[in-house]
Image (cartoon, grey):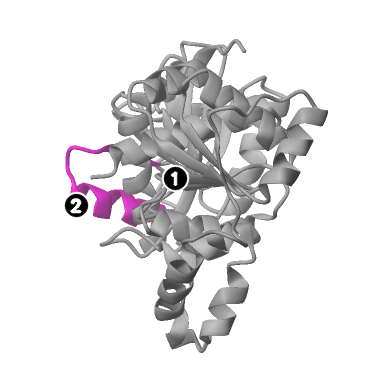
Amino acid sequence: MEYTGVTYDMIYKAKQNLKTIVLPESEDMRILKAASIAVKEKIANIILIGNKEDILSRCINNNIDISGIKIEDNLKSEKRNLYKEELFILRKHKGISLDDADNLLNDKIYYATMMLKNNDADGMVCGACNSTPDTLRPALQIIKARKGLDLVSSFFIMQTPNTNLGLSGKFIFSDCGLVINPTEDDLVEIVLESYDSFKKLLNGEPKIALLSYSTLDDIKDENVIKLQNVVRRVKEINNNINIDGQLQLDAAIIEDVAKIKAPNSSVAGKANVLIFPNLESGNIAYKIAERFGNMTALGPITQGMDKPVNDLSRGCNASDIVGVIAITALQSSAIK
């Protein structure tokens, strides 16, 4: 399979440090095709969760080669008792019994999450046929946010054919998938995590714009004041972060507009990390960019999790899944 642009970059980097990614949705043909590609092209080692005979039968019937892929049956695994005991310890404060923990492991996503918790896998990719809550709930309960963080958020890696924008056409959009109405504290964490994600995955210098309906105006609106406070607080935490806001989208990414609306800004006209004020605006924006603007969208990718767990769009294809597998592997490589 041929890849271009940002997907090619992610896959190339993932091949340099092979990681093990668990895929619990073995009933989905797109997952099986992506697993086959990932192993054949040496992008990652893959573990599929489910009944071995059923998986092999589906692959044979659809001419999918999964040689070299480990299959773990969550109902028969030798590690099930260990995972059950650990899951009970982790969740007994919520009132679950040992039997409850055992029953949860019948769910392949919970089982895969326990594999990740026990370092039997480096990352998990799921969501091709499960909702975002069903995909991320086990991870939020078991893996949780990285130490020092209170929030798990998400981002998309976006690429436009116009290489004059962003970092040679590449952007991070955040948050477009998880945090519905971020508070000021939430936005500070989203900015800091997006900054790290950009540096680790895109290897460039982030220029962060907090987007709004006005550009650096002294407007007595609580939403604008919130963004201005976020800029101030981020600079207090790390003065090396190049951030500005509030900025309108055109002022953030178009230099000619920036010269008029924000001539003294070091970010305006050059932004490559776009932070949206809420989930509604972020989710709409990435879909407009993808559908009307011919941008490639990779994600949503979670950030802030102690170990990488990523949620697929249910409209994804096998190529999309391979890209997310590569990103998940890179996130694992970046975790200290």
Question: 277 or 92: which is nearer to us?
Answer: 92
Amino acid type at circle 1 is Gly
Q: Residue at x 51, y 83 (%)?
A: 98
Q: Residues within 10 Å of mark 1 (few under 14, many from 20)?
A: many
Q: Residue at x 31, y 48 (%)?
A: 231
> Looking at the picture, how far across and down is residue 246, in whole percent?
42, 44
The span from disc 2 to disc 1 (Cα, nearest Å) is 29 Å
Q: Residue at x 49, y 61 (%)?
A: 78
Question: 161 or 87: which is nearer to us?
Answer: 87
Question: 62 or 280: which is nearer to us?
Answer: 62
* Quadrant holding the C terminus: top left
Q: Is residue 263 above or below residue 58?
A: above
> Looking at the picture, how far across and down is residue 133, in whole percent?
63, 61
Task: Report the magenta residues as a range.
Answer: 225-245
The furthest residue to the right: 61
Question: 56 or 111: which is nearer to us?
Answer: 56
Label 1, secondary structure: give it. Answer: strand
Label 2, secondary structure: give it. Answer: helix
Q: Is residue 203 above or below residue 132?
A: above
> Looking at the picture, how far across and down is residue 6, in whole percent?
49, 19
Residue of label 2: 237
Residue of label 1: 123
Frontmost of labels 2 and 1 is 1
Amino acid type at circle 2 is Ile
